[in-house]
Image (spheres, rainbow, N blue to C red):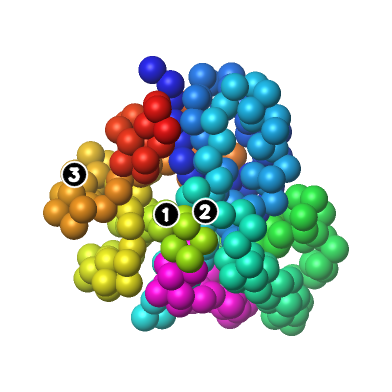
Amino acid sequence: MKKIDLHVHTNFSDGLYSPKEVIDLAKEHDYGVIAITDHDNIGGYLHIRDYAKQVGIELIPGVEISTNHKGRDVHILAYDFDLDNLELKELLQKIYDSRFERAVKIIEKLNKRGIDISIEDVQNFAGENNYIGRPHIARAMIEGGYCAHKYEAFELHIGEHCYAYVPKFAPSSKKAIKTIHKANGISVLAHPYTLGDDRLIYDLIRYGLMGMEVFYAKCNDETIYHYNEIAQKNYLIRTGGSDFHGDGIDLEIFGNYTAPDFILEEMNRGENE
Ligand code: AMP
Ligand code: ZN
Ligand code: FE
Ligand code: FE
Protein backbone atom coordinates (compact mmCIF):
# COMPACT_ATOMS: atom_id res chain seq x y z
CA MET A 1 0.00 0.00 0.00
CA LYS A 2 1.31 3.41 -0.91
CA LYS A 3 1.80 5.93 1.88
CA ILE A 4 -0.05 9.24 1.73
CA ASP A 5 0.70 12.64 3.28
CA LEU A 6 -1.38 15.61 2.17
CA HIS A 7 0.14 18.34 4.35
CA VAL A 8 3.83 19.07 3.84
CA HIS A 9 5.76 22.35 3.93
CA THR A 10 8.96 23.29 2.11
CA ASN A 11 11.29 26.28 2.26
CA PHE A 12 8.98 28.03 -0.21
CA SER A 13 7.13 28.82 3.01
CA ASP A 14 8.41 28.09 6.51
CA GLY A 15 9.70 24.54 6.11
CA LEU A 16 13.40 23.80 6.45
CA TYR A 17 13.77 21.56 3.40
CA SER A 18 13.71 22.48 -0.27
CA PRO A 19 10.98 20.95 -2.46
CA LYS A 20 13.54 18.54 -3.94
CA GLU A 21 14.74 17.47 -0.50
CA VAL A 22 11.12 16.89 0.54
CA ILE A 23 10.41 14.74 -2.52
CA ASP A 24 13.64 12.77 -2.02
CA LEU A 25 12.76 12.19 1.62
CA ALA A 26 9.24 11.13 0.64
CA LYS A 27 10.69 8.67 -1.89
CA GLU A 28 13.10 7.30 0.67
CA HIS A 29 10.18 6.67 3.04
CA ASP A 30 8.03 5.03 0.37
CA TYR A 31 5.35 7.64 -0.03
CA GLY A 32 3.15 7.30 -3.11
CA VAL A 33 1.04 10.44 -2.79
CA ILE A 34 2.12 13.78 -1.37
CA ALA A 35 0.69 17.28 -1.32
CA ILE A 36 3.04 20.19 -0.79
CA THR A 37 0.82 22.65 1.05
CA ASP A 38 3.05 25.64 1.61
CA HIS A 39 1.52 28.67 3.29
CA ASP A 40 -0.09 31.08 0.84
CA ASN A 41 1.92 30.14 -2.28
CA ILE A 42 2.32 27.32 -4.79
CA GLY A 43 5.88 28.10 -5.89
CA GLY A 44 7.30 24.94 -4.34
CA TYR A 45 4.70 22.75 -6.02
CA LEU A 46 5.33 24.32 -9.46
CA HIS A 47 9.08 24.05 -8.93
CA ILE A 48 9.10 20.32 -8.22
CA ARG A 49 6.08 18.75 -9.92
CA ASP A 50 8.05 17.40 -12.90
CA TYR A 51 10.71 15.91 -10.65
CA ALA A 52 8.06 14.27 -8.45
CA LYS A 53 6.55 12.68 -11.53
CA GLN A 54 9.96 11.42 -12.65
CA VAL A 55 10.59 9.64 -9.34
CA GLY A 56 7.07 8.20 -9.27
CA ILE A 57 5.42 10.33 -6.60
CA GLU A 58 1.92 11.59 -7.26
CA LEU A 59 2.02 15.24 -6.25
CA ILE A 60 -1.38 16.79 -5.60
CA PRO A 61 -1.61 20.59 -6.06
CA GLY A 62 -2.07 22.15 -2.64
CA VAL A 63 -1.76 25.31 -0.60
CA GLU A 64 -2.52 26.28 3.03
CA ILE A 65 -4.22 29.67 3.29
CA SER A 66 -4.15 31.62 6.56
CA THR A 67 -7.62 33.11 6.92
CA ASN A 68 -9.51 35.06 9.53
CA HIS A 69 -12.82 34.06 11.08
CA LYS A 70 -14.11 35.97 14.09
CA GLY A 71 -10.59 37.11 14.87
CA ARG A 72 -9.17 33.59 14.79
CA ASP A 73 -6.32 32.35 12.59
CA VAL A 74 -8.06 29.63 10.57
CA HIS A 75 -5.93 27.58 8.16
CA ILE A 76 -7.78 26.43 5.08
CA LEU A 77 -6.13 23.89 2.81
CA ALA A 78 -6.93 23.90 -0.88
CA TYR A 79 -6.37 20.90 -3.15
CA ASP A 80 -6.69 20.12 -6.81
CA PHE A 81 -7.53 23.67 -7.84
CA ASP A 82 -7.06 25.27 -11.24
CA LEU A 83 -3.48 26.57 -11.10
CA ASP A 84 -4.22 29.42 -13.48
CA ASN A 85 -7.32 30.75 -11.76
CA LEU A 86 -6.77 34.49 -11.58
CA GLU A 87 -8.82 35.18 -8.49
CA LEU A 88 -7.03 32.54 -6.42
CA LYS A 89 -3.64 33.67 -7.73
CA GLU A 90 -4.42 37.28 -6.80
CA LEU A 91 -5.59 36.30 -3.34
CA LEU A 92 -2.39 34.35 -2.68
CA GLN A 93 -0.26 37.18 -4.09
CA LYS A 94 -1.90 39.73 -1.81
CA ILE A 95 -1.19 37.62 1.29
CA TYR A 96 2.36 36.96 0.13
CA ASP A 97 3.09 40.66 -0.51
CA SER A 98 1.82 41.70 2.92
CA ARG A 99 4.28 39.36 4.64
CA PHE A 100 7.39 41.35 3.79
CA GLU A 101 6.04 44.65 5.15
CA ARG A 102 4.85 42.88 8.24
CA ALA A 103 8.28 41.30 8.83
CA VAL A 104 9.87 44.75 8.62
CA LYS A 105 7.42 46.04 11.26
CA ILE A 106 8.11 43.09 13.58
CA ILE A 107 11.85 43.65 13.25
CA GLU A 108 11.46 47.36 14.09
CA LYS A 109 9.65 46.42 17.28
CA LEU A 110 12.36 43.91 18.18
CA ASN A 111 15.10 46.48 17.46
CA LYS A 112 13.47 48.90 19.92
CA ARG A 113 13.88 46.25 22.62
CA GLY A 114 17.57 45.79 21.82
CA ILE A 115 17.20 42.71 19.64
CA ASP A 116 19.51 43.78 16.89
CA ILE A 117 18.54 41.72 13.85
CA SER A 118 17.96 43.05 10.35
CA ILE A 119 15.63 42.06 7.54
CA GLU A 120 18.72 40.70 5.73
CA ASP A 121 19.52 38.43 8.69
CA VAL A 122 15.99 37.07 8.44
CA GLN A 123 16.10 36.73 4.65
CA ASN A 124 19.16 34.51 5.02
CA PHE A 125 16.81 31.86 6.36
CA ALA A 126 14.22 32.27 3.63
CA GLY A 127 14.00 30.03 0.58
CA GLU A 128 14.45 31.15 -2.99
CA ASN A 129 11.05 32.83 -3.26
CA ASN A 130 11.85 34.98 -0.20
CA TYR A 131 8.76 34.01 1.78
CA ILE A 132 9.14 35.31 5.32
CA GLY A 133 7.19 34.05 8.31
CA ARG A 134 7.70 34.36 12.03
CA PRO A 135 9.67 31.08 12.11
CA HIS A 136 12.34 32.78 9.96
CA ILE A 137 12.47 35.72 12.36
CA ALA A 138 12.83 33.24 15.23
CA ARG A 139 15.76 31.57 13.47
CA ALA A 140 17.54 34.93 13.08
CA MET A 141 16.94 35.66 16.77
CA ILE A 142 18.44 32.32 17.74
CA GLU A 143 21.45 32.86 15.48
CA GLY A 144 21.97 36.32 17.00
CA GLY A 145 22.03 34.73 20.44
CA TYR A 146 18.84 36.44 21.59
CA CYS A 147 16.88 33.23 22.13
CA ALA A 148 17.73 29.65 22.95
CA HIS A 149 15.05 28.12 20.76
CA LYS A 150 12.00 28.83 18.60
CA TYR A 151 9.51 28.37 21.43
CA GLU A 152 11.25 31.02 23.50
CA ALA A 153 11.08 33.46 20.57
CA PHE A 154 7.33 32.87 20.24
CA GLU A 155 6.71 32.84 23.99
CA LEU A 156 8.53 36.07 24.81
CA HIS A 157 8.75 38.14 21.64
CA ILE A 158 6.78 37.30 18.50
CA GLY A 159 3.84 35.18 19.70
CA GLU A 160 0.32 36.52 19.32
CA HIS A 161 0.28 38.07 22.79
CA CYS A 162 3.77 39.60 22.67
CA TYR A 163 4.99 43.16 22.14
CA ALA A 164 6.49 42.49 18.72
CA TYR A 165 3.49 40.71 17.23
CA VAL A 166 2.08 42.24 14.08
CA PRO A 167 -0.88 40.52 12.41
CA LYS A 168 -0.57 39.72 8.74
CA PHE A 169 -3.20 40.35 6.11
CA ALA A 170 -5.62 37.45 6.10
CA PRO A 171 -8.74 37.13 3.96
CA SER A 172 -11.92 36.01 5.68
CA SER A 173 -12.41 32.25 5.80
CA LYS A 174 -15.60 32.74 3.79
CA LYS A 175 -13.76 34.61 1.04
CA ALA A 176 -11.00 31.98 0.91
CA ILE A 177 -13.47 29.08 0.70
CA LYS A 178 -15.45 30.80 -2.07
CA THR A 179 -12.27 31.61 -3.98
CA ILE A 180 -11.03 28.01 -3.76
CA HIS A 181 -14.35 26.78 -5.11
CA LYS A 182 -14.29 29.27 -7.97
CA ALA A 183 -10.93 27.73 -8.89
CA ASN A 184 -12.59 24.28 -8.82
CA GLY A 185 -10.56 23.32 -5.77
CA ILE A 186 -11.41 21.35 -2.65
CA SER A 187 -11.53 23.44 0.55
CA VAL A 188 -10.42 21.66 3.73
CA LEU A 189 -10.17 22.91 7.31
CA ALA A 190 -6.60 22.18 8.48
CA HIS A 191 -5.91 20.76 11.99
CA PRO A 192 -9.48 21.46 13.26
CA TYR A 193 -8.53 20.92 16.91
CA THR A 194 -6.41 24.09 16.92
CA LEU A 195 -9.63 26.14 16.71
CA GLY A 196 -10.60 24.93 20.15
CA ASP A 197 -14.26 25.70 19.41
CA ASP A 198 -16.30 23.37 17.20
CA ARG A 199 -18.98 26.05 16.64
CA LEU A 200 -16.58 27.76 14.26
CA ILE A 201 -16.54 24.61 12.11
CA TYR A 202 -20.30 24.91 11.56
CA ASP A 203 -19.84 28.51 10.39
CA LEU A 204 -17.33 27.25 7.82
CA ILE A 205 -19.70 24.48 6.74
CA ARG A 206 -22.34 27.15 6.11
CA TYR A 207 -19.83 28.90 3.85
CA GLY A 208 -19.51 25.69 1.84
CA LEU A 209 -16.43 24.05 3.40
CA MET A 210 -15.91 20.71 1.64
CA GLY A 211 -13.53 18.84 3.89
CA MET A 212 -11.73 18.54 7.19
CA GLU A 213 -8.23 17.33 8.05
CA VAL A 214 -9.44 14.56 10.34
CA PHE A 215 -6.28 12.42 10.20
CA TYR A 216 -3.79 15.04 11.36
CA ALA A 217 -0.58 13.33 12.43
CA LYS A 218 -0.09 15.39 15.58
CA CYS A 219 -3.49 14.43 17.05
CA ASN A 220 -4.32 11.59 19.42
CA ASP A 221 -6.89 8.89 18.60
CA GLU A 222 -9.64 10.52 20.65
CA THR A 223 -9.29 13.78 18.77
CA ILE A 224 -9.30 11.97 15.44
CA TYR A 225 -12.44 10.07 16.50
CA HIS A 226 -14.14 13.32 17.48
CA TYR A 227 -13.48 15.11 14.18
CA ASN A 228 -14.19 11.97 12.20
CA GLU A 229 -17.71 11.99 13.66
CA ILE A 230 -18.25 15.64 12.80
CA ALA A 231 -16.93 15.08 9.27
CA GLN A 232 -19.13 12.07 8.63
CA LYS A 233 -22.29 13.64 10.07
CA ASN A 234 -21.81 16.67 7.85
CA TYR A 235 -20.76 14.80 4.69
CA LEU A 236 -17.29 16.34 4.66
CA ILE A 237 -14.39 14.88 2.74
CA ARG A 238 -11.78 13.60 5.19
CA THR A 239 -8.09 14.28 4.58
CA GLY A 240 -4.89 13.82 6.54
CA GLY A 241 -1.30 14.92 6.73
CA SER A 242 1.74 15.41 8.93
CA ASP A 243 2.23 19.22 8.65
CA PHE A 244 5.92 18.47 8.14
CA HIS A 245 8.17 21.52 8.53
CA GLY A 246 11.39 19.55 9.02
CA ASP A 247 12.20 20.55 12.58
CA GLY A 248 11.57 19.10 16.04
CA ILE A 249 9.78 15.77 15.96
CA ASP A 250 8.74 16.23 12.34
CA LEU A 251 11.44 13.95 11.00
CA GLU A 252 10.19 11.16 13.23
CA ILE A 253 6.55 11.65 12.30
CA PHE A 254 7.24 11.91 8.60
CA GLY A 255 8.08 8.44 7.43
CA ASN A 256 5.95 6.68 10.01
CA TYR A 257 2.77 8.50 9.16
CA THR A 258 0.26 7.71 6.49
CA ALA A 259 -3.27 8.94 5.93
CA PRO A 260 -5.81 6.19 5.21
CA ASP A 261 -6.09 5.49 1.50
CA PHE A 262 -9.89 6.01 1.35
CA ILE A 263 -9.25 9.76 1.59
CA LEU A 264 -8.17 9.70 -2.06
CA GLU A 265 -11.51 8.26 -3.05
CA GLU A 266 -13.32 10.87 -0.98
CA MET A 267 -11.31 13.49 -2.87
CA ASN A 268 -12.31 11.82 -6.12
CA ARG A 269 -8.77 10.70 -6.77
CA GLY A 270 -9.33 6.95 -6.69
CA GLU A 271 -7.17 4.55 -8.73
CA ASN A 272 -9.26 4.98 -11.85
CA GLU A 273 -9.46 8.75 -11.87
P1 AMP B 1 3.23 33.44 10.46
O1 AMP B 1 2.43 32.81 9.35
O2 AMP B 1 4.38 34.21 9.94
O3 AMP B 1 2.37 34.22 11.40
O4 AMP B 1 3.86 32.24 11.30
C1 AMP B 1 3.04 31.19 11.70
C2 AMP B 1 3.87 29.94 11.87
O5 AMP B 1 4.68 30.09 13.03
C3 AMP B 1 3.02 28.71 12.13
O6 AMP B 1 2.68 28.06 10.92
C4 AMP B 1 3.92 27.86 12.99
O7 AMP B 1 4.80 27.11 12.16
C5 AMP B 1 4.76 28.88 13.75
N1 AMP B 1 4.26 29.14 15.10
C6 AMP B 1 3.16 29.84 15.46
N2 AMP B 1 3.03 29.91 16.80
C7 AMP B 1 4.08 29.23 17.31
C8 AMP B 1 4.53 28.94 18.63
N3 AMP B 1 3.87 29.37 19.71
N4 AMP B 1 5.66 28.22 18.78
C9 AMP B 1 6.34 27.80 17.69
N5 AMP B 1 5.98 28.02 16.43
C10 AMP B 1 4.87 28.73 16.22
ZN1 ZN C 1 4.11 26.63 8.76
FE1 FE D 1 -1.51 25.26 9.67
FE1 FE E 1 0.75 23.58 7.83
The residue labelled by disc 1 is: 186
Spot occupied by residue 200 in the image (x, y as percentages of width and height): 28, 71
Give x and y (percent) for residue 134. Answer: 63, 63
Depth check, mark 3 against mark 2: the one in front is 2
Packing grade of label 2 (10 A; few <14, some 14-19, many >=20) is many
Q: CA distance from mark 2 to mark 1?
A: 7 Å
Q: Is residue 161 above or below residue 272?
A: below
Q: How many marks?
A: 3
User: Does label 1 or label 3 sit earlier along the sequence?
Assistant: 1
Check disc 3 and report its element: helix, strand or loop.
helix
Q: Which residue is farthest right?
A: 120
240 over 110 or under it: above or below:
above
SS class of the residue under badge 1?
strand
Instruction: Please provide percent x and percent y for residue 154.
Output: 55, 63
Tell me the element at label 2. loop
Q: Closer to the camera, 69 or 63?
A: 63
| Magenta highlight range | 158-180
Of marks 3 and 2, which one's residue comes earlier in the chain?
Answer: 2
Q: Quadrant of the C terminus?
A: top left
> Is any part of residue 100 visible from this angle?
yes
Above or below, comparing residue 177 to residue 214 in the picture = below
Q: Amino acid at mark 3?
A: Tyr
Distance Cα–Cα, label 3 vs label 2: 28 Å
Judging by the rendered image, the residue that carries numbered circle 2 is: 81
Q: Which mark is residue 138?
A: none
Q: Which mark is residue 225?
A: 3
Does residue 140 appear anywhere in the picture?
no
